[in-house]
Image: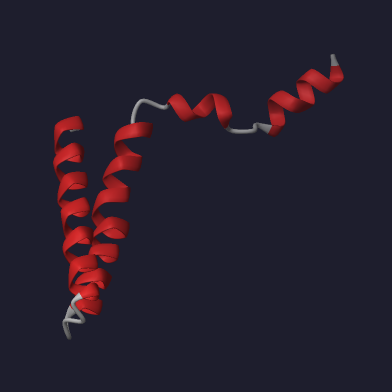
Amino acid sequence: MKTVLKILFTIFLLWMIAGAYLLNTEHPKAQVVMGLGVLYMSFILMPLFIYYRYKDGKYKKYVMNSHKDKKKAED
């Protein structure tokens, strides 16, 4: 999964570089290329990254739990 994320991120960077080049050359489809790059990042790259980072439940120590807080306050 880590390798897949690196490949997808590299594709995203190349896509954005190509879009920036097209914007500088005032190509008529430059806005479309940049917009598709943002959609790619937000709907493909970020969900995969979030799944990869939090699949093992490491985030649970950062989640506030009101039941634990009440028990600590009572003690």
Find the residue positioned furthest to the right. Answer: 74
Question: In this image, 40 relative to 59: left or right?
Answer: left
Quarter the C terminus occupies: top right
Vertical relation: 63 (above or below) 47: above
User: In the image, what residue occupies the spot 78% across and 27% down?
Assistant: 70
Q: Position of residue 55 (x, y in %)?
A: 33, 31
Q: Position of residue 38 (x, y in %)?
A: 29, 64
User: In the image, what residue occupies the spot 58% across and 33% down?
Assistant: 63
Quarter residue 48 falls in: top left
User: In the image, what residue occupies the spot 35% across and 41% down?
Assistant: 50
Quarter the N terminus occupies: top left
Vertical relation: 11 (above or below) 31: above
Quarter residue 49 falls in: top left
Question: In this image, 68 relative to 60: left or right?
Answer: right
Q: Position of residue 65 (x, y in %)?
A: 65, 31
User: In the image, what residue occupies the spot 16% across and 63% down?
Assistant: 18
Vertical relation: 41 (above or below) 22: above
Question: In this image, 56 relative to 27: left or right?
Answer: right
